[in-house]
Amino acid sequence: MVLANPHFQKLPSQYLFPRIAKEAALLKEKKPESRIINLGTGDIKEPLVPSIVTALCDAALEMGETKSFKGYGPSQGYFFLQELIALHDYPFLHIHPDEIFISDGAKCDSANIQDILDPKSLVALADPSYPVYVDASLMTGKKIVFLPCTEENGFCPKPPNRHVDLIYLASPNNPTGVAMTKEALEPWIYYAKRESAILIFDAAYEAFITGSCPHSIYEIEGAREVAIEIRSYSKSAGFTGLRCSYMVIPKTLILPLHPLWMRRTDTKFNGVSYIIQKAAAATYSEQGKKELSAQINRYQANTATFRTYLNQLGLTTFGGIDAPYIWCKTPPNFSSWQFFELLLHQAHILTTPGAGFGPCGEGYVRFFAIEEPSEAMKRLSALSLRT
Ligand code: PLP
């Protein structure tokens, strides 16, 4: 008799975001006139910038001409994009284009990388963290060590006093919005080397860093031996619908994962479409950089305004400086889900309950605050949340 993968029984019955979307849909069903402000799902708000739209159109036209039509591309990605990434995203960090794998999402990469690791590997990850890391570990039958991230430790995971094989670190972190400093990252590289462990560094939000925190794990000495880095165009360039990201797997890792990932990629992936890779390439043009930097600045300004406003209401917040996420403490006597319900039903503002990201997220809600916040602020004022 055919059997389902038994590891799936260890998962929560539903992924976090469909669950909160369902709550919003139920409200809409009951009150069709409600205009819900979505500060829950981490989706982008502005349309694509003109340079990217032009690149998409030009590439589509190329596909309609015999001389420039492209069929299957290289599964690892086109060299033109790998070369631009190495040049612009890793100047002086000695990343070779051939170490870069272009993909259709940081979500898939951060989960799929587990395919090439021993199913018995012990995984360490932050609590709270992006739910994909937990679910992907459970789906592949791995055991997890949770690293509590609390107000006391500044929401920065510290290396555990035991061996683990694989570590997920996201900086800036989702959901706390906190970025790790060089001093906080260095012990992880020492740890990974000492324990012969591999670190997956998810830098999906690096474009939002305002201060001096590292944008890349390869800024830390020794990282080329133990760290894989993931980046995405989703939030930095509005590609949540287009889909493009990349993963850096150095050929110098202590465990030679580059050939294994190449082997997996050749078997299971036929590459990101040419049109989308051309659009990603446009993010590195002078005009593209200018437009995207202005877009990120607008998002950052909105996040800052909203964070200040939450503080004026007497709410305690973290993050929101190096990331578009604000990690907000719930008012006294409110659990994460209770505050989520209050905001949804009384202000029609969708957030994400912190407890959905792990037990240490209890007592918080996450705001993804990149849109112009005046309407949300008006609605919060009406709630009289002053604590
Ligand atoms: N990594 C983190 C930490 C995220 O928060 C997200 C999306 O919210 C992703 C990866 C997914 O990125 P992508 O759209 O490239 O799949």
Image (cartoon, helix red, strand yellow):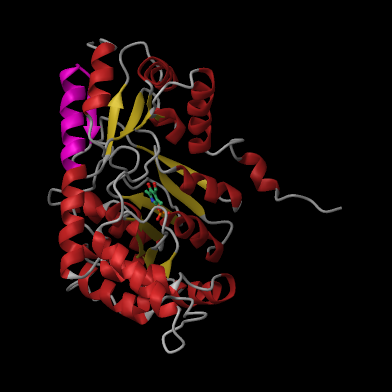
In the rendered view, would you say 98 is above or below 303?
Answer: below
Q: Is residue 316 magenta?
A: yes
Q: Which residues are magenta?
A: 300-319
Q: Is residue 151 magenta?
A: no
- The single residue placed furthest to the bottom in the displayed view is 67
Query: Residue 78 placed where, x, y %?
Result: 39, 79
In the rendered view, would you say 333 is above or below 210?
Answer: above
Horizontally, residue 95 falls left or right of residue 32, namely: left
Q: Nearer the viewer, residue 320 or 378?
A: 378
Q: Nearer the viewer, residue 81 or 123?
A: 81
Magenta-highlighted stretch: main secondary structure?
helix
Horizontally, residue 241 falls left or right of residue 44, namely: right
Q: Is residue 249 visible?
A: no
Residue drawn at (23%, 19%) of the image: 378
Q: Nearer the viewer, residue 165 or 90?
A: 90
Horizontally, residue 124 falls left or right of residue 11, namely: left
Query: Residue 232 placed where, x, y %?
Result: 35, 58
In the rendered view, would you say 98 is above or below 148?
Answer: below
Residue drawn at (60%, 50%) of the image: 139
Query: Residue 71 placed where, x, y %?
Result: 51, 81
Residue drawn at (38%, 18%) of the image: 339
Residue drawn at (31%, 69%) of the image: 55
Query: Residue 149 placed where, x, y %?
Result: 33, 36
